């Protein structure tokens, strides 16, 4: 009788709601096809430290609705920089007889996955697990929808208090270099203005833009305002000062240019948007993508990552995926602008 195919799964980088659903999908699909499945604790660190354990169907019970990742996660820069660390990881995988690995994470995790595939011959498949939605080859990443919903929920709460006091809230959301969380949550929360790093403006240009948006809102009788800003806007050294609090203070000090009294406050949503129970959309995405990852490994395919384009599950070479440049959806930005008039 032929040996069972043995595969492992790890989650790496910033956690994302839906990672657990992806782990469950990979484990249960693999077991369905009579494969052996192993979970690696804390991403590439667990590979290095041989923190690798067999998983049963029961081990992934009661996790589909939980945020975070039952496998834990880590960022391990030595994995990319130190070939000895990587060699140790490959030896540990081989010692368990594992010849297929699913890596669920963002672009940094994918770079690691590509090294494993190129250097060790172990078949690797990537699953896009990140709230940022910053992987160009896929329309959506696992965790993005939940993060957007968390931001919208928080902005709804801010709206209540901003409306009661006639204030302006400047809300900072995550996304690293990608403005998708800001654009989607800004549209869904009815923001007056959305600031994203893909639109290149200086601090003064952004302030002019905000003045004009708030003038329009106050002129039509609005008593308060919501501004959503992606953290990537202040990521460059020149823009480091341009935080939600800085913008709020500037607006307060420049009420006369806006033509209305302004009482603005900054609010950083922060890591809250990375937690919480995944939405149904993220759970279904994780289920579909996890199933595809196992199918690819069953066909002995590696060096690929799973995505979704126009609601169809696709697979793309990891190297190609990493070289693709994400384009901002200009129409969504125009729409946000039209709807805020
Ligand atoms: O990549 C996911 C992410 O949450 C980004 O949106 C954010 O910039 C970063 O991770 C924060 O990283 P950390 O949790 O290590 O502070």
Image (cartoon, rainbow, N blue to C red):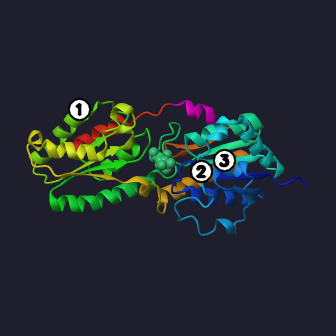
Give the main secondary structure, helix, strand or loop, of the magenta stretch. Answer: helix
- Residue 70: percent from left, percent from top: 61, 61
User: Element under label 2?
Assistant: loop
Observer-nearest residue: 137 or 186?
186
- Residue 17: percent from left, percent from top: 51, 57
Q: CA distance from mark 1 to mark 3?
A: 43 Å
Residue at the limit of the structure toward the right, as seen here: 1
Estimate how packed mark 3 is, as few (under 14), some (14 to 19) or many (20 or more) residues with alpha carbons within 10 Å. Answer: many
- Residue 255: percent from left, percent from top: 12, 44
Q: Which residues are magenta?
A: 316-324
Confirm or deny contact between disc 3 and disc 2 (CB under 8 A).
yes
Which residue position holds label 2?
74
Which circle marks residue 204 in the picture? 1
Estimate how packed mark 2 is, as few (under 14), some (14 to 19) or many (20 or more) residues with alpha carbons within 10 Å. Answer: some
Estimate how packed mark 1 is, as few (under 14), some (14 to 19) or many (20 or more) residues with alpha carbons within 10 Å. Answer: few
Residue at x 10% of width, y 39% of height? 257
| Quarter in which the N terminus is drawn | bottom right
Which circle marks residue 129 in the picture? none
Q: Earlier in the sequence, mark 2 or mark 1?
A: 2
Which residue position holds label 3?
44
User: Element under label 3?
Assistant: helix
Q: CA distance from mark 2 to mark 1?
A: 38 Å
- Residue 60: percent from left, percent from top: 65, 65
């Amino acid at each position: 009788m032929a040996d069972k195919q043995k595969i492992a799964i790890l989650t790496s980088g910033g956690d994302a709601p839906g990672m657990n659903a992806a782990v469950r999908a990979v484990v249960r699909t693999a077991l369905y096809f009579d494969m052996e499945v192993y979970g690696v604790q804390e991403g590439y660190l667990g590979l290095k430290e041989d923190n690798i354990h067999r998983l049963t169907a029961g081990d992934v019970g009661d996790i589909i609705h939980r945020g975070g990742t039952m496998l834990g996660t880590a960022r391990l820069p030595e994995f990319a920089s130190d070939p000895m660390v990587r060699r140790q990881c490959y030896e540990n995988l081989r010692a368990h007889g594992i010849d297929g690995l699913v890596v669920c994470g963002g672009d940094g995790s994918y770079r690691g996955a590509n090294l494993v595939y190129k250097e060790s011959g172990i078949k690797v498949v990537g699953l896009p697990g990140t709230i940022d939605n910053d992987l160009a080859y896929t329309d959506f990443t696992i965790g993005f929808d939940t993060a957007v919903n968390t931001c919208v929920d928080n902005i709804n709460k801010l709206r209540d208090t901003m409306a009661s006091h006639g204030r302006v809230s400047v809300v900072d959301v995550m996304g690293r270099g990608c403005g998708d969380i800001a654009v989607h949550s800004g549209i869904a929360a009815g923001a007056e203005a959305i600031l994203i790093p893909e639109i290149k403006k200086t601090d003064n240009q952004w302030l002019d833009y905000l003045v004009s948006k708030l003038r329009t809102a106050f002129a039509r009788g609005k008593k308060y305002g919501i501004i959503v800003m992606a953290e990537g806007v202040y990521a460059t050294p020149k823009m480091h000062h341009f935080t939600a609090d800085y913008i709020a203070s500037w607006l307060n000090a420049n009420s006369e240019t806006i033509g209305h009294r302004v009482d603005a406050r900054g609010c950083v949503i922060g890591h809250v948007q990375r937690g919480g129970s995944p939405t149904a959309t993220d759970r279904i995405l994780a289920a579909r993508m996890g199933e595809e990852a196992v199918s690819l490994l069953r066909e002995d395919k590696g060096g690929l990552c799973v995505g979704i384009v126009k609601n169809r599950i696709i697979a793309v070479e990891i190297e190609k995926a990493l070289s693709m440049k994400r384009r901002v959806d200009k129409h969504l930005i125009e729409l946000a602008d039209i709807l805020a008039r």
